[in-house]
Amino acid sequence: MEIDKFWTRGNLKERINDALSDSDLNKSNLKIEDLHPIDQYHARGIAATRDLAEKVSIKENETIIDVGCGLAGPARFFADKFKCNVVGVDITPAFIEVGNDFNKRTNMHDKVSLHVTDGKSLPFENNQFDAAISQHVTMNVENRELFFTEIFRVLKKDTFFAFSEHGLGPKGTPYFPLPWADDEKMSFLLDPEKTIELLKEIGFKSISFMETGEKYMEGYEKSIKTNSSSKKPVLGMHVIGGPTMYDRQKNSMLSIKEKRTLPFEIICFKN
Ligand SMILES: C[S@@+](CC[C@H](N)C(=O)[O-])C[C@H]1O[C@@H](n2cnc3c(N)ncnc32)[C@H](O)[C@@H]1O
């Protein structure tokens, strides 16, 4: 599957094993923080996940869903912070395999369960979850309506859906390759206003919209600077994203700067 190949980029497990060994972390009983440099696989990493978590409230023992959970770094963070359960789903089997391994190594396997699933057909009952999150996934999803409708369906009434993405900017056509796609075949960016309209049509209410472009440009700048220095850290976005990651980040930064993309975060509710 093309999307699977894109996200896995060759021997993912070997790259992870080597990086963990080189950082003396190839062991069980890791702290969830130990994995943050590689398991928060989106622009700004753990800082963005923390920001998102600050804006929502989840009660102890509630169960939330993370659609497009990647290696389940954000899922473990939310489970730990809120003492909730997280069900993570992702279309890339290798990410779920590594995510399960990371759950065991951090002793989070009782709180976080993972499934290989396309977010457009969630294998769950209606009205089942107490909240939904999805960080930087939708850029790969051509049929947004189906993706959002599935999330709406599995949410209980009065619960939130919080997500972030790179929307299409007013100037259009970003520079490829990007962190989420090598070319337009995998990238389906939508004008943020159209996204909001779509969410309303599906039935989401109380939609709050936050532009995140400035923060992302700062984050990319920091990441590119750190990783082009001679003391490049062993753990970083390149472990999962491969050696082209920082060039793809440069393209993303330039696309934001030139308003070709417009990153944002939305929190909305199923009323
Ligand atoms: C940028 S990564 C973000 C991973 C995770 N949300 C995080 O923030 O660490 C994008 C993820 O979306 C997943 N993805 C893309 N399309 C998907 C779909 N239709 N259903 C489920 N997952 C999808 C990819 O496999 C990848 O893991």
Image (spheres, rainbow, N blue to C red):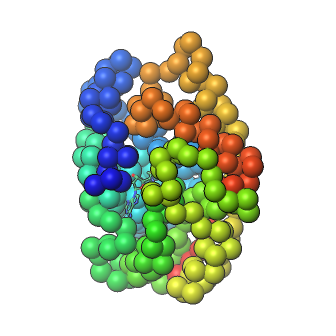
Vertical position of residue 137 compared to residue 196: above or below? above
Residue 99 in the image: state x and y as whole percent: 31, 46
Q: Is residue 261 left or right of residue 10?
A: right
- Residue 232 is situated, as x and y percent measured from the top left of the image, at 53, 18
- Tell me the residue at 35%/39% (across/down): 9
Above or below residue 90? Residue 32 is above
Q: Position of residue 166 (x, y in %)?
A: 60, 57
Picture coordinates of residue 128, whole percent (x, y) = 35, 78
- In front: 23, or 173? 173
Ligand 1 shown in quarter: bottom left
Q: Is residue 79 at least partly visible in the picture?
A: no
Q: Which one is nearer the viewer's eye here, 233 or 24?
A: 233
Closer to us: 108 or 220? 220
The residue that appears at 32% across and 46% down in the rendered structure is 5
91 in relation to 205, above or below: above
Quadrant housing residue 230: top right
The C terminus sits in image quarter: bottom right
Q: Which corner quadrant holds the N terminus?
A: bottom left
Specify the farthest residue to the top.
230
**253 or 163: which is nearer to us?**
253
Task: Report the number of discs.
Answer: 0
Question: Does 187 sit left or right of 17 as displayed?
Answer: right
- The quarter of the displayed image where residue 238 is located: top left
Q: Is residue 239 above or below residue 115?
A: above
Describe residue 135's horizontal placement relative to residue 222 as left or right: left
* Residue that appears at 45% across and 73% down: 143
Q: Is residue 167 visible?
A: yes
Please name the residue shown 27% across and 46% down the image.
94
State the image quarter where residue 221 is shown.
Answer: top right
